[in-house]
Amino acid sequence: RVAITAGMADPVEIPYRHNLYKGLPVPDFITPERYKELETIHQSRVDDVFIATYQKSGTTWLQHILYELYDHPQGEVENINDGVPWIEEYSQDKIDALVSPRIFKTHDRWDWIPKGNKVKYIYCYRNPKDVCCSYYNHMKNVFVGHYKYSGSLSEFFSDIFIKPNTSEQGWYFDHVAGWLEQNGNPNILFLTYEDMVEDLKREVLKIIKFLGLQCTEEKIDCVVNSSLFDSMSKNPKVNYTWRDGDKKDPNSKFIRKGKVGSWQDELTKEQS
């Protein structure tokens, strides 16, 4: 357990493995030095696209959709993160070596994310109650070897999720609010997880229009079908089975439910 002061009167205890950046926890494999590189030496390209989300809000889903829509610009990959890299996790040399168009994944806050002329951003957000339950499962049951978190869901809710400055990249509500303040920015497309569950093809068509892509009806249907829950959960390129071992519990499911409202079976009335 690490105590920090993150803009609050009292020290905050963060009961999982992490690094710190600007007073907020970030994954322990992302260093402050890497963030500094992105601030100082990273060069944006006019056709860069960022998929941005808070944790457990459709990130991998969108990685898969965009990589298919763009016809695999980095070639065939064994896992989706090689085709749509988490920009903070990869070295700058690797990022610079990617062919255009580059598609990036990030959980960055708006004020942290790299900016650039004509760069496009797709921000997807989700009901915080479902985020909380999925994030807990992610930390406690899936990547248990990474986070080393041992608390209950109730402890996770009170000690991490609902408390400011103790979740990765900060408080959910600050993260979403910071992005939504950019509503009206023509280079940002806002999506919700719930809308994607309700009508995936409708949301894929929004993405295609936003990015100015030309896709046949056959192509669109293929992308949609391959992005449905059953297909995603069985796809080794996106279901994180490549991480099974010391970091990920091989008996856990990274793509768990893909539903809306499952928090009702997990959170108490008081918590919700």
Image (cartoon, helix red, strand yellow):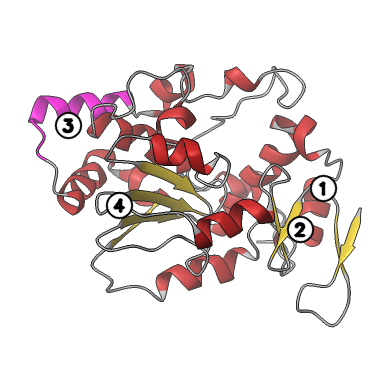
Do tag 4 and tag 3 residues touch (Cβ < 8 Å)?
no
What numbered label is drawn on residue 160? 2
> Residue drawn 23% across and 27% down?
71
User: Which mark sits nearer the N-terminus, 3 or 1?
Assistant: 1
* 3D distance between C-alphas at marks 1 and 4: 35 Å
User: Which mark sits nearer the N-terminus, 1 or 2?
Assistant: 1
> Residue drawn 90% across and 63% down?
3
User: Which mark sits nearer the N-terminus, 4 or 3?
Assistant: 4
Q: Quadrant of residue 32?
A: bottom right
- Residue at which label 1 appears: 16
Q: Secondary structure at mark 3?
A: helix
- Which stretch appears magenta? 214-226
- Residue at which label 4 appears: 45
Do tag 1 and tag 2 residues touch (Cβ < 8 Å)?
yes
Comparing labels 1 and 2, the label whose residue is closer to the camera:
1
* 3D distance between C-alphas at marks 4 and 2: 36 Å
Do tag 1 and tag 4 residues touch (Cβ < 8 Å)?
no
Tell which of 192 and 263 is nearer to you: 192
Magenta run includes residue 217: yes
- Residue at which label 3 appears: 220
Residue 259 seen from this side: no
Q: Measured along the vertical axis of the image, is residue 179 above or below residue 267? A: below
Comparing labels 1 and 4, the label whose residue is closer to the camera:
4
